[in-house]
């Protein structure tokens, strides 16, 4: 016998049959999305419509901290409703006379707005609706905070272009203007491309192809500065070139290999050489990228501290990349660093080749 899907009225509201639970859950998810932008967001009318339908009352209103109320339905005494809202905004406590009630909405222990309900309904249902709206507002605030943090981390990476590297690159380019103008022109284009990619991009994701092009440009400039002492090997499998990855996750790893792995070996008067190898390939459903140098290396405990964000100021790029990878793909993903004193460093990035929401 099929299960009925109608609602069962009762005094002060209604109770759901079991088959209505899916509809309520869908409504809750929709309300959470509608309230993501806060009490004045564009989704508030839709959220109020859903809430009024669930509570089966005359009107439901949501007020922001200025006292302005958006309504769904018509309150029977709008003046009383405005007075109740004003009372809540001044006292942060419940106000109103039955059947009208105004409830403070507290998010992170701060008043975020007022929920107004006009209609015959039990206070337990009003309190439940208030908690529902508070949870939706808090979830939206947390999502916004996470998004702002991610944007701040990207800005931090963009701001990490080494002034020392820029000065050296421009000095080399200037020195070639007369002796080798064609080479100078090529390097100037590389420099412009490097700056453009590092500073002008605004998307969250890019492709393996674009990231590898960026590191090729960076390494071309570094070779112009360091000369034949720096050797470079770049190998990327064609099948992974179109894979989407978070923007600016490879260039900081390569820059770290050159600055902290190679440059300490290239002391004045030294004829030391070194190699940076970058590889990208598919392993089953994963993309694996490695950046390896045969430089000075470091103590594994130091590498652990760097990934934990406790390293020196000029090493924050690695921790930044690691956090962003884990944020996008989950705690199981991130950077793997293999290193030892005098034995070079190998940094491995392993991420899914296809992941929901990750697209250039």
Image (cartoon, rainbow, N blue to C red):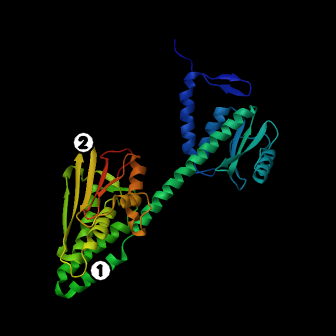
Position of residue 279 measured from the top left corner of the image (x, y, whole percent) = 22, 56
Position of residue 193 measured from the top left corner of the image (x, y, whole percent) = 29, 70
Residue 157: tell me if it is visible.
yes
* Image-based side of 148 in relation to 332, left or right: right
Mark 2 highlights which residue? 284
Q: Do the residues labelled 1 and 2 touch (CB within 8 Å)?
A: no
Q: In this view, does 1 lie above or below 95?
A: above
Position of residue 60 measured from the top left corner of the image (x, y, whole percent) = 69, 40
* Image-based side of 344 in relation to 301, left or right: left
Position of residue 124 measured from the top left corner of the image (x, y, whole percent) = 72, 33
Q: In this view, does 40 lie above or below 175?
A: above
User: Mark 1: which secondary structure?
Assistant: helix
Tell me the quarter of the picture where residue 347 sits. bottom left
Depth check: 306 or 108 in front? 306
Work out whether mark 1 precedes mark 2 in sequence or the reverse, and give the earlier one. 1
Mark 1 highlights which residue? 168
Tell me the quarter of the picture where residue 303 sits. bottom left
Residue 43: tell me if it is visible.
no
What residue appears at the point 53 percent right and 34 percent down from the top-left corner?
A: 26
What residue appears at the point 44 percent right and 62 percent down from the top-left corner?
A: 310
Q: How far apart are marks 1 and 2 (CA)?
A: 42 Å
Where is the C terminus found, in terms of image quarters? bottom left
* Image-based side of 255 in relation to 10, left or right: left
User: Mark 2: which secondary structure?
Assistant: loop
Tell me the quarter of the picture where residue 275 sits. bottom left
* Image-based side of 349 in relation to 70, left or right: left
Q: Specify few, some or many for label 2: CA neighbours under 10 Å numbering under 14, 14-19, or 20 or more.
A: few
What residue appears at the point 59 percent right and 44 percent down from the top-left corner?
A: 136
């Amino acid at each position: 016998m099929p299960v009925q899907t109608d609602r069962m009225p009762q005094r002060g509201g209604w109770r759901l049959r079991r088959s209505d639970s899916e509809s309520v859950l869908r409504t809750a998810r929709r309300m959470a999305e509608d309230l993501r932008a806060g009490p004045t967001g564009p989704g508030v009318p839709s959220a109020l419509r859903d809430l009024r339908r669930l509570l089966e009352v005359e009107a439901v209103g949501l007020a922001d901290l200025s006292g302005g109320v958006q309504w769904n339905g018509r309150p029977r005494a709008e003046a009383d409703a405005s007075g109740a809202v004003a009372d809540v905004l001044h006292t942060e406590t419940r106000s109103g006379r039955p059947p009208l009630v105004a409830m403070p909405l507290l998010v992170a222990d701060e008043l975020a707005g007022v929920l107004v309900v006009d209609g015959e309904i039990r206070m337990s249902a009003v309190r439940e609706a208030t908690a529902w709206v508070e949870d939706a507002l808090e979830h939206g605030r947390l999502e916004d905070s996470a998004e702002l943090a991610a944007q701040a981390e990207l800005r931090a990476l963009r701001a990490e272009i080494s002034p020392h590297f820029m000065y050296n690159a421009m000095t080399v380019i200037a020195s070639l203007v007369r002796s080798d103008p064609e080479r100078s022109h090529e390097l100037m284009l590389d420099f412009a491309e490097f700056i453009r990619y590092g500073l002008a991009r605004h998307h969250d994701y890019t492709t393996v192809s674009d990231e590898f092009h960026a590191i090729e440009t960076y390494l071309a400039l570094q070779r112009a500065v360091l000369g034949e002492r720096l050797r470079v090997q770049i190998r990327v499998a064609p099948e992974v070139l179109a894979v989407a990855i978070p923007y600016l996750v490879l260039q900081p790893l390569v820059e770290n290999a050159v600055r902290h792995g190679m440059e300490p070996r290239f002391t004045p008067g030294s004829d030391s050489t070194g190699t940076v190898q970058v590889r990208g390939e598919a392993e089953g459903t994963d993309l694996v990228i490695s950046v390896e140098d045969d430089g000075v290396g470091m103590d594994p405990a130091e590498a652990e501290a760097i990934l934990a964000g406790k390293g020196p100021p000029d090493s924050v790029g690695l921790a930044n990349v690691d956090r962003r990878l884990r944020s996008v793909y989950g705690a199981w993903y991130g950077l793997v660093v293999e290193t030892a004193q005098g034995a070079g460093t190998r940094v491995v990035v392993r991420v899914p080749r296809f992941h929901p929401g990750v697209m250039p």
